[in-house]
């Protein structure tokens, strides 16, 4: 498991949340054993974007299938299983997934 953080030191609470989010991704996206996943929180630089977003990537590597990426306009610590599942149910897009109650999300 990669415990990648948002470009800085990853605090203990974020490490625990990253492991939790990866578990949710593995469940909802049916990720096979041995596939690398990355979860990180970044400052959002898009227009009309909340200050932070969480990026989640499944890297299939040698197993084929390329990378799958989802971005959620939310802090890592605020993610729930339901929000992660909803993001993976959507098609991948550069705009990302806007959870309910965040800047006009559903």
Image (cartoon, rainbow, N blue to C red):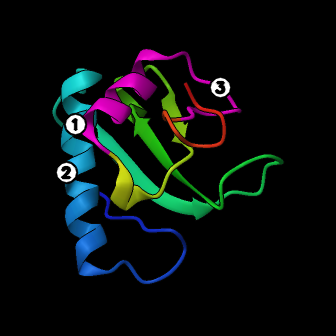
Residue 16: image quadrant is bottom left
> Of the numbered discs in the image, which one, if any, rests on residue 20?
2
92 w.r.t. 102: above or below? above
Residue in view at x 27 percent, y 47 percent: 21
Pointer 3: residues within 10 angstroms few (<14), some, or many (20+)? few
Q: In which quadrant will I find the N terminus?
A: bottom left
| In the displayed structure image, the side of residue 62 where residue 51 appears, left or right | right
* Label 1 sits on residue: 24
Tag 1–tag 3 contact (CB < 8 Å) = no
Tag 1–tag 2 contact (CB < 8 Å) = yes
Q: Residue furthest right?
A: 47
> Of the numbered discs in the image, which one, if any, rests on residue 93?
3
| In the displayed structure image, the side of residue 61 where residue 7 appears, left or right | right
Residues drawn in magenta: 80-98
Q: CA distance from mark 1 to mark 2?
A: 7 Å
**Residue 25 position in % (x across, y down):** 28, 34
């Amino acid at each position: 498991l990669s415990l990648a953080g948002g470009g800085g030191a990853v605090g203990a609470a974020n490490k625990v949340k990253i492991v939790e989010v990866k578990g949710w991704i593995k469940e909802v996206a049916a990720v096979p054993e041995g596939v690398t996943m990355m979860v990180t929180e970044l400052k959002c630089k898009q227009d009309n974007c909340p200050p932070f977003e969480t990026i989640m990537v499944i890297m299939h590597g040698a197993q084929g299938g390329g990378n799958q990426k989802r971005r959620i306009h939310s802090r890592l610590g605020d993610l729930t299983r339901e929000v992660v599942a909803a993001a993976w149910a959507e098609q991948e897009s550069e705009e990302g997934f806007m959870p309910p109650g965040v800047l006009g999300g559903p």
